[in-house]
Amino acid sequence: MEDKVYVIDTSGFIVGVHFTDDTMVTVPGVVDEIIDRTSRLRFDLMHDAGLRVEPPLGVFKEQVVSAAASTGDAGVLSETDIDVLAKALELAQKYKVILISDDYAVQNVASGLELEFKPAGSSGITKEIVWELKCTGCGVVVKSGSECQICGSAIRRRRAGH
Ligand SMILES: [Zn+2]
């Protein structure tokens, strides 16, 4: 199995992506853009958990700029956007890369470069929520129904493991 690498842009820290065992990478420009306290805290936690901050190689920035020119996004991409895309492209030479960005221009250029991307809010690295039906009285977990067969209390849907 190929190693999976998540390249995370600024929106990933604003929306908040969950921890993952996979490699997480961002670029210095993103770190400069994270200014609000919550995003900074998320960044610090992820950095402690192994998030890498690396600038991209120039050769990949050139490829991104030329791809952006052909998709018509060159005028709206920031220097940081270009760096994030270039880093993703660079790592994609070796790894299975998923770019995390809510920016439509970034997503569009990523498509042009045949890079896989996901929006931060619904990224695959957020934990999947598993629901279960649990009795509010005795706590038994059931497969169906609205009333507990054991104690007669109401059955509620809730997140499994909570
Ligand atoms: Zn019950």
Image: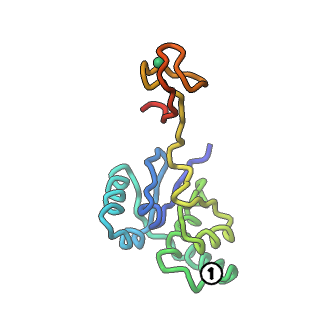
Q: Which residue extends farthest top?
A: 150
Q: Work out which quarter of the rendered image holds the N terminus and state it.
A: top right
Residue in the foreground of this view, choosing between 138 and 52: 138
Amino acid type for the residue under numbered disc 1: Asp
Q: Position of residue 131 (x, y in %)?
A: 54, 34
21 shown above or below 82: above
Q: Residue at the location (46% across, 44% down)?
A: 21
Which residue is under mark 1? 73
Q: Position of residue 62 (x, y in %)?
A: 58, 79
Residue in the foreground of this view, choosing between 94 and 142: 142
Q: Residue at the location (56% across, 75% down)?
A: 59
Give the crowd class for mark 1: few <14, some 14-19, many >=20 residues within 10 Å: some
Q: Position of residue 65 (x, y in %)?
A: 60, 80
Q: Position of residue 64 (x, y in %)?
A: 60, 76
Label 1 CB less than 8 angstroms from ligand 1? no
Q: Work out which quarter of the rendered image holds the C terminus and state it.
A: top left
118 shown above or below 152: below
96 left or right of 80?
right
Q: Residue at the location (64% across, 63% down)?
A: 115
150 shown above or below 129: above
